[in-house]
Structure formats: C-alpha cells, structure tokens
Amino acid sequence: MADAVIERLTEATAEAAQQIDELLGQLTEHAETLDADRLALIVGSPGALYVARVDGVIVGIICRVDLHHPVRSKAWVEDLVVDEKYRGQGIARRLFETLIAEVPSEIVSLNLNSKVSRTDSHRLYSKLGFEVREDSRIWRLVLPEK
C-alpha cells in the first residue's frame, strides 16, 4: 500500500501541471491539455485543488469549486481521479475527507455529478454521506469556441 500525502495545491508549476495532465487522461478523453498557466488559473480560483502524492509524484486529484450567489453559498466537487496503479488503497476517500474538512463555513452544501456507470465511485460517495437528489437534473449548454 502506498503512503500518499494529501495536500492543497497552492502553486502552479510545470511539473505539477504535467503530472495532473497525465492523470486527466484516466478520467476523461475530453480533457483540455493542462499547462502551468491553466493550472495557475485553477489554483487562483475560488475553491481548492487537492493532490495526493506518492514519493513526490501526483497520483490523485480532487477539485472543489466554491460558488457564492444571492440564495446561498455552495460548492461543487469536480475531477476526482486516482492513478489506476494506486486505486483501492483509500486515496480517493482521503482526498474527499481532506476536501470536506476544509470547506469554508459559509458553504452549506457540497454537490457533484457522476456518470451512471461509475458504480464504484457511487459507493464511496454514499459512504461519505452524499445522497442522490431525485428531484433535479443537471442541464448543460456547451458554448461555442471563441
């Protein structure tokens, strides 16, 4: 079992961007290439990006996006991925637990969406206390490239 260190990423480096970019290929085939400039934009945005490192190499990530609007403040969990060589070792759970522990007090809920086929992930979400909202649907508008 790998001894992973979980930490909030606070600095965008080319090395971190390259390691995360490699991980994103295991999450989706639709990810944009991540470079240091884009990573700096993410690190500087409201929310947090957490990484799991084994021997200094990033082997997992999870992102929290904070949204503050007139009704309430809430956050979305995005882009959880653990390198396939390190899955089943509790790294995803530890990433989630760190993210949850560091949610700012004004945030009243954490939300996420997940593909129906990701049943292993759904078991983890349930164990962490997430519940499926049967009364809503996720709607999306894909914007044209500018």
Image (spheres, rainbow, N blue to C red):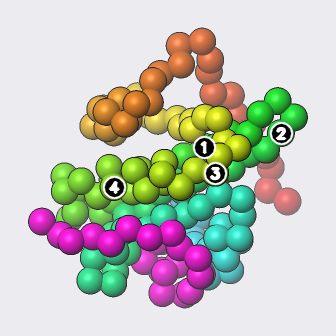
Q: Which mark is residue 94?
A: 4
As measured in the structure, the alpha-carbon distance from the residue carrying label 3 to the one carrying label 2 is: 15 Å
Q: Quadrant of residue 131?
A: top left
Disc 1 is placed on an element classified as strand
Q: Tell me if 73 is positioned left or right of 121 in this view.
A: right
Q: Which mark is residue 69?
A: 2
Given the image, on which type of amino acid does mark 2 rest?
A: His
As measured in the structure, the alpha-carbon distance from the residue carrying label 1 to the one carrying label 2 is: 13 Å
> Residue extending furthest top?
135
Badge 2 crowding class, 10 Å Cα cut-off, few under 14, some 14 to 19, many 20 or more, is few
According to the picture, the residue beneath numbered tag 1 turns out to be 76
Give the camera-side residue of 121 and 4.
Answer: 4
Say whether residue 19 is magenta.
yes
Q: Quadrant of residue 11?
A: bottom right
According to the picture, the residue beneath numbered tag 3 turns out to be 104
Q: Is residue 48 above or below residue 130?
A: below
* Magenta range: 1-29
As measured in the structure, the alpha-carbon distance from the residue carrying label 3 to the one carrying label 4 is: 18 Å
Is label 3 in contact with label 4 (beta carbons under 8 Å)?
no
As measured in the structure, the alpha-carbon distance from the residue carrying label 1 to the one carrying label 3 is: 13 Å
Foreground mark, 4 or 1?
4
